[in-house]
Amino acid sequence: MKLYRIVIFFSVLLFVNAVNAQHLSDSAQVSLLTCGAGNQLYSTFGHSAIRICDTENNIDIVFNYGTFDFSTKNFYFKFSHGTLMYMLSVNSFRDFLQSYKYENRSVYEQKLNLVHHEKEKLFLLLIENSKPQNRNYRYDFFKDNCSTRIRDILQKTTGENLKFSNQNTKGNKTFRQLIYPYLEKMQWSKFGIDILLGMPTDACATNADYMFLPCELLKNVDTATINGTKFASPIEILYQSHEVSSSNPLSPNQIFFTFMALSILLSIWELYMRLKNRKINMKIFDRIFFASMALLSVIILLMWIFSLHYPVRNNLNILWLNPLYLYIFIKLEKSNFYIILICIICNMTVLCGQYFIPQHFNTAFFAIITAATVRLIMMTAKNLKI
């Protein structure tokens, strides 16, 4: 039996038990659980869940909006297309905590200061969301995820009584700036994300938007008030992760600035040999380089056109990862002068206008752009027999 089906099976059992309880006792406690970063990209931003603990009714369960099925048919296509369905599952608190201990991920708890009828209202809303016809939803990393769903259901439960401090109102960061700290140890993931995510990622986030990140939800709940009193009790550490030594692979900056230097040196050598009337063949180098550029440009274009993930649209990386590189790759030694010129102009626009273009570019991109521009200039000079 697949893990996903096991989760569903036990979720149903816990769900039935919760429904049978119907009402929470006066001693019931509602908590926000926040889990630290994991080693995989999907878990590096942390996780949020809601715990309902009612010992009188033998309930200690976690409502988890972050469940998905790796065995879904065409999983990666659906994920990239934006049609992968996530679901709200119900787990025992013991199993939930144990799984995060096993993954060596910290777990924090904030008990929420809700009155009894608010606890019951939240509990019933969660049960309603857990029903088979309601539990699935289309995941959106920035706008609809395990953290924003909890923010919204807490607001729905408490209405105007719950006040967040709006501590992030001044000097708002962009969505890209918010996720960067989580990617410091995952430079290649950061590089890939910067290629795929376009201008929407550089929009300023509102205070409510900040809470798409579990850690930011934790901070906001910690400073929030309800009916003039603190909304949450002090943060409790249920499990503290321990440091694990990890290797430090070469970063994109190290790789691509070295590549840029190599491209420039090879181009200088090619020019020198040409002045000496000696032939040098750079065809293999250029084909591999421009094939890579063309492939990335096609991926960006397809994501922009077909993906339902709005952050991948309006991606100005299309300026330097120009689809015209596909033509240049095919017609390497007979490329049209004006096609090459357009690519050079687009590259120079990014290099010279990086502070004016409304999208952030990864530092490593400038090394790739410089290398591509140098090779395009050499190609033009060769085609014009300069």
Image (cartoon, rainbow, N blue to C red):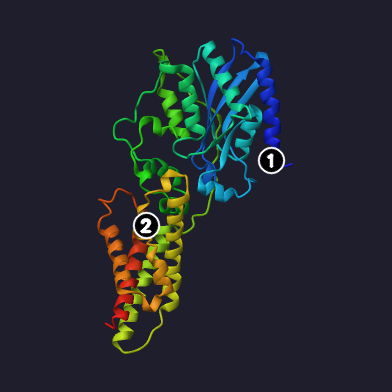
Q: In terms of secondary structure, where does tag 1 sit?
A: helix
For label 1, count other residues whose C-alpha is less than 10 Å away and answer few (under 14), some (14-19) or many (20+): few
220 or 134, nearer to the observer: 134
Q: Which residue is mark 1?
A: 3
Dot 2: what SS?
A: helix
The x and y percentages for residue 266 are 36, 76
Residue 376, image x, y percentages: 33, 71
For image coordinates 49% across by 55% down, the residue present is 248
* Location of the C terminus (image quadrant): bottom left
The three-letter amino acid code for the residue at tag 2 is Ile
Disc 1 to disc 2, C-alpha distance: 40 Å
Q: Which residue is mark 2?
A: 318
Residue ID at (62%, 27%):
131
Query: With 295 as the anchor, is 66 left or right in this view?
Result: right
The mark nearer the N terminus, 1 or 2, is 1
Q: Nearer the viewer, residue 7 or 144?
A: 144
